[in-house]
Amino acid sequence: MRIDILTLFPEMFAGPLSESIIKRARERGLVDIRIHNIRDHTHDKHRTADDRPFGGGPGMVLTPGPIFECVESELPEGTHLVYMTPQGRPLTQAMVEELAGRDAFAVLCGHYEGVDERVREALVDDEISIGDYVLTGGELPAMVLVDAVVRLLPGALGDDESAQQESFADGLLDCPHYTRPEVFRGMQAPEVLLSGNHGEIARWRREQAEARTRERRPDLTNREK
Ligand code: 4FV
């Protein structure tokens, strides 16, 4: 898979995309992540990539020129471009799985008040939000999206890191997990998990996941996956 990221702050991605599972997936060639600095597509000596909003008001808006040029010169024709914005579709595991099924996609990171609307009209294919709150930029949302997608790529998770037994895998929140010691500060791990009876264990985990989902996220129970 190829993932292109368009940002004014490429250095922000150094850490999160160069550690642990994402780092290994890149090293294994499972994903080719390319980060483009939108400012490299400016032509004035101040490398200006934003300007004051027409009609006045606070903040700055990312100008269309450098973004159009970055998309047209860096991305293969027809690349699916996702813009991270609070106005986007709330991100779900189903959307992550859809993106993980693609050969390639690109992520545009806004900043300040956002991008000029003509970028959204002419270039953006999908808008995604990671939650109903306002961040300083689209970089962290882009990292969240890339992390969620890359871990689903075949071979990204070692067999000890399964994508099967987890939240939302079947539309439910995850069940509780326990490991050694059996008793910690007087707190006993559930006997059923130590029983070796896999049928019983699977039933217990399912019941726990359903109960936890009903308690914490009843909205999930009637959401189709
Ligand atoms: C955001 C979110 C988000 C809004 C203004 C970037 C910021 C600034 N993106 N989910 N929540 N973006 O807060 O995706 O341009």
Image (spheres, rainbow, N blue to C red):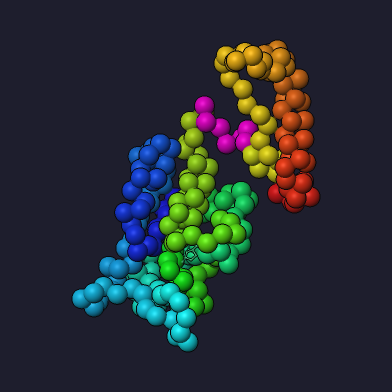
Can see residue 59?
A: yes
Residue 204, position as x, y percentages in the image: 75, 25
Q: Nearer the viewer, residue 143 or 93?
A: 143
Q: Is residue 212 above or below residue 198?
A: below
Q: Nearer the viewer, residue 48 or 71?
A: 48
Q: Nearer the viewer, residue 136 or 116?
A: 136
Residue 21, by quadrant, is: top left
Residue 43, position as x, y percentages in the image: 25, 76
Can see residue 79?
A: no
Q: Is residue 92 left or right of residue 201?
A: left
Residue 107, by quadrant, is: bottom left
225 part of magenta stretch: no
Q: Is residue 92 above or below residue 188?
A: below
Q: Which residues are magenta?
A: 160-166
Q: Residue at x 45, y 51 (%)?
A: 143
The furthest residue to the bottom: 55
Residue 11, position as x, y percentages in the image: 31, 54
Q: Is residue 19 above or below residue 104?
A: above
164 part of magenta stretch: yes
Q: Is residue 114 left or right of residue 182?
A: left
Q: What is the tally of numbered marks visible in this picture?
A: 0
Q: Residue at x 40, y 45 (%)?
A: 16
Residue 215, position as x, y percentages in the image: 76, 40
The furthest residue to the left: 45
Q: Is residue 43 left or right of residue 180?
A: left
Residue 193, by quadrant, is: top right
Q: Nearer the viewer, residue 189 or 198?
A: 189
Prevailing secondary structure of the magenta residues: loop
Q: Residue at x 72, y 25 (%)?
A: 202
Q: Residue at x 61, y 62 (%)?
A: 89
